[in-house]
Amino acid sequence: MMKRMTLFFTLAAAGMTMMNGCASPEARYYTLAASRSNVTPAVTGRASRSSEPLWIEVTPVRVPERLNRIQLVVRDGTSGEVKLLDTSRWTSPLPDELRDALSQQLQSTLGALDVYQRGLPATQPAFRVTTEVVNLDANVGKWAAATIAWTVRRLPDGKVLSGRTETEVPAPGQMEGVVKAYREILAATAADIAAGVQSLDR
């Protein structure tokens, strides 16, 4: 009887070891929000011209359907094949990640307030920012690139300025390098948009 029990516990332990060995690796989560030290400081002179804040409304970013998911989508650094990485995920859906990161950069660069979901002021000029990701791609360990179309609309008169930011930057290492490169791309896009807002704010 003791031998049978010993055999049972030995087999059970072996089974648990195999199950633990086959467990899926834990997912890692990434965000496109930049740390405070990496956000471009305000360069606008509006504060000296007016006591009113600069109002902006950064709307959700449109992305291709293949990218509209929680997992990161990249190219394999060796084969170049497109891969959906189930263990590398965004902390929120990609359109929200992009919107929040652009808003963060624009508020800091322009000294502005983003009133998205809070309503635009009725009597003061405001600037609505819309963006669309035409392409966002990364070859792990090599590069990351994007083409982002954007439009700034001055309210209430409706004057519009549109542009397109095309950027490619190195993305060394693994996924941390890709995410860092995406942040650089968004910073470049935000700089172009900020210049558009300043052009309309004259």
Image: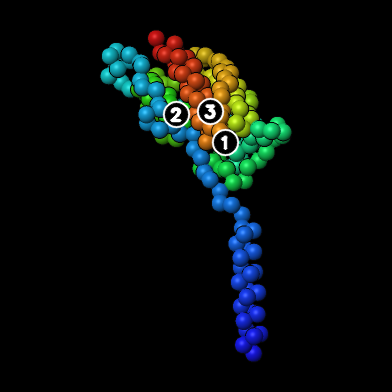
Q: Residues within 10 Å of mark 3 (few under 14, many from 20)?
A: many
Q: Quadrant of the C terminus?
A: top left
Where is residue 96? Give x, y as percent. Answer: 52, 36
Which numbered mark, 2 or 1, is in the foreground of this view? 1
SS class, disc 1:
loop
Q: Identify residue type, mark 1.
A: Gln
Q: Which residue occupies 56% across, 33% down?
A: 173
Q: Which residue occupies 57% across, 36% down?
A: 174
Q: Nearer the viewer, residue 101 or 139?
A: 139
Count of labels in the image: 3
> Closer to the N terminus: mark 2 or mark 3?
2
Mark 3 sits on what residue?
181
Mark 2 sits on what residue?
103
SS class, disc 3:
helix
SS class, disc 2:
helix
Q: Residues within 10 Å of mark 1 (few under 14, many from 20)?
A: few
Where is residue 38? Give x, y as percent. Answer: 40, 27
- Colour scheme of this structure image? rainbow
